[in-house]
Amino acid sequence: MKPRLLIVDDSWSMRQTLRLLLAPDFDCALAEDGPSALNHARSQPPDIILSDVNMAGMDGFELCRRVRAEPSLEQVPFLFLSGHEPPAGVREQGYIYLVKPVPPAILVSRLRELLPPRRAIPPTGS
């Protein structure tokens, strides 16, 4: 069984692109904003979350804080993917942040590294 990945991005085309790219390795669920992502995570806890940062209403950092506040979700790994450099201090606070464009192999590799050992997947082609 593939690990469950929740992809959160306010761009329909980015959600679809990421799903197509990551579907061979992950069971992908999609959310268009922070509130819908939080609701989805509560009802169907993912193994990992990949989120845009700049979204209307609830940005990716607020989504991460709210996910971490949920006892059943506090250990879910969170990877940020954004078209902008991170604000000062973000990486020092322990956030994992990649700047678009990211080569697909790097994105898949980072997601694999973040999965808890029980959900780890072998590299494609193994």
Image (cartoon, helix red, strand yellow):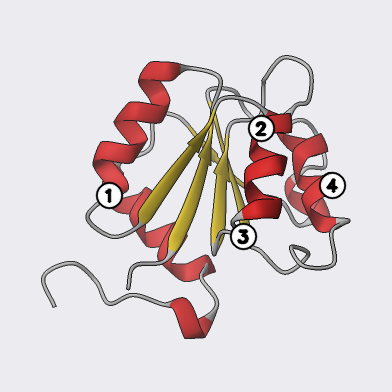
Instruction: Identify the image quadrant of the N terminus.
Output: bottom left
Question: How far apart are the alpha carbons under marks 4 and 2?
Answer: 15 Å
Could you tell me which residue is drawn at 39 percent across and 48 percent down? 28
In space, the residues marked 2 and 1 are separated at their CA atoms by 20 Å
* Mark nearer the viewer, 3 or 1: 3
**Image quarter for residue 108?**
bottom left
Distance of mark 4 from mark 3, alpha carbons?
Answer: 16 Å
Disc 3 crowd rating (10 Å Cα; few below 14, some 14-19, many 20+) is some
Where residue 17 appears, as percent x and y from the top left, is: 30, 29
Amino acid bearing label 2: Ser
Q: Which residue is mark 3?
A: 45
* Amino acid type, mark 1: Ala
Which tag is nearer the camera, tag 4 or tag 3?
3
- First of labels 4, 3 by sequence position: 3
Where is residue 74 drawn, in percent x and y? 78, 64
| 10 Å crowding of disc 1: few (<14), some (14-19), many (20+) | some
Residue drawn at 35 percent across, 36 percent down: 18
Q: Are marks 4 and 3 in contact (CB under 8 Å)?
A: no
**Residue 125 badge:** none
The residue sitting at 47% across, 54% down in the picture is 5
Residue underneath mark 2 = 36
Q: Amino acid at mark 3?
A: Pro
Marks 3 and 1, how far apart at CA: 17 Å
Q: Which residue is mark 1?
A: 23
